[in-house]
Amino acid sequence: MEEKILEIMRIVFETNDVNVNSTQENCSAWDSMAQLNLALELEEELGISLEPEEISKMKSFDEIKNIVEKKL
């Protein structure tokens, strides 16, 4: 699952500089619009539905992974 999430993040942020240590703070492409696009892609690719409060908590790879794993 980690690799799938990273793949989606790389596509949305249009950079290969994404890894398990990526956060909103250390990824310059990770702005509010990219965050929404990331949520939409995760929902579409993984067949899940994210609540607005979950999307707002997605500020790091670890947080995204935890939220997604709870949905699967």
Image (cartoon, rainbow, N blue to C red):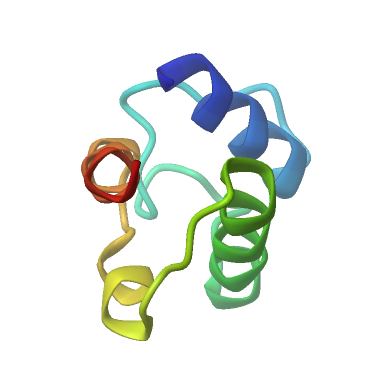
For the point 54% across and 66% down, the residue is 35
Q: Nearer the viewer, residue 49 or 30?
A: 49
Farthest top residue in view: 3
For the point 47% across and 66% down, the residue is 49
**Figure check: 3 above or below 17:** above
Looking at the image, residue 47 sits to the left or right of residue 16; the answer is left
Where is residue 71 shown, x and y percent of the image? 31, 50
Where is residue 6 shown, x and y percent of the image? 54, 26
For the point 49% across and 56% down, the residue is 48
Q: How many marks?
A: 0
For the point 32% across and 75% down, the residue is 56
Farthest bottom residue in view: 52
Looking at the image, residue 34 sits to the left or right of residue 48; the answer is right
**Figure check: 15 above or below 53:** above
**Figure check: 69 above or below 1:** below
Q: Nearer the viewer, residue 68 or 10?
A: 68
Looking at the image, residue 42 sits to the left or right of residue 55; the answer is right
Q: Quadrant of residue 34?
A: bottom right
Q: Nearer the viewer, residue 7 or 44?
A: 44
**Figure check: 7 above or below 22:** above
Where is residue 39 shown, x and y percent of the image? 55, 62
Q: Quadrant of the N terminus?
A: top left
Where is residue 26 shown, x and y percent of the image? 40, 43
